[in-house]
Image: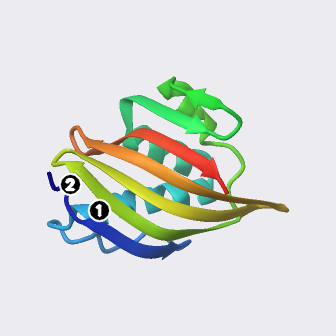
Amino acid sequence: MSCGPIYRGAMTRTEPSTTPPDEGDEDARLAELERAGWVALSIGGDAAREHYERVLSEAPLMLLPGSLVLDDRASMVASMAGAPWDEHELEDVRVHRLADDAAVVAYGVRARRGDMSYSALMSSVYVRRDGWRLALHQQTPR
């Protein structure tokens, strides 16, 4: 059974694109959703909260470093208003289709906030429910 093509690309911190991906390129759209999340987290405050309010599914799950498991959508959205990242770089972004209405966006990230650096492998599972929605996000520090 084929799971569809894998999209690969390099991404870095930029301002949100004013030119949306081609309507037929769902994989690029999914990669852009993930990139837009990092841009929002680098702006912080309302930008991050608003992005995740729009993008999170109704019953999301996040598996984070330190054995942290989040499954309360309202708490997730509220937590996005924390201190913004000063810089970030996404590496080797891949989109792997699981079905017509589900896909994984996997990549590495290097980010910095003040004097703290963070490097991790990330995976985000998106489902198509009235647009693409983030259902599961997992981070593995490296």
Mark 1: give few (<14), some (14-19) or many (20+) Cα within 10 Å: some
Q: Secondary structure at mark 1?
A: helix
Residue 124 vs residue 76: left or right? left
Question: Which residue ends up furthest to the front in the rendered image?
Answer: 1
Place of residue 5 in the rendered image (x, y in percent of width and height, measured from the top left): 23, 65
> Given the current orientation, which residue lies at the most extreme top position?
72
Nearest to N terminus: mark 1 or mark 2: 2
Counting from the top left corner in percent of width and height, residue 34 is at: 43, 57
Type of amino acid at the residue the image marks with label 2: Cys
Q: Is residue 37 visible?
A: yes
Residue for point 61% across, 39% down: 64
| Residue 79, horizontal then vertical, whole percent | 62, 36
Residue 112 appears in which quarter of the rendering? bottom right
Q: Residue at x 85, y 62 (%)?
A: 115
SS at circle 2: loop
Label 2: few (<14), some (14–19) or many (≥20) C-alpha neighbours in 10 Å: few
Q: Which residue is labeled 1 in the image? A: 29
Does residue 89 lie above or below 26 as drawn? below
**Image point (43%, 67%), residue name:** 93
Total count of labels: 2
> What residue did someone put label 2 on?
3
Amino acid residing under circle 1: Arg
| Image coordinates for residue 28, horizontal then vertical, percent | 29, 67
Cα distance, mark 1 to mark 2? 17 Å
Q: Is residue 98 left or right of residue 57?
A: left
| Closer mark to the observer between disc 1 and disc 2 | 2
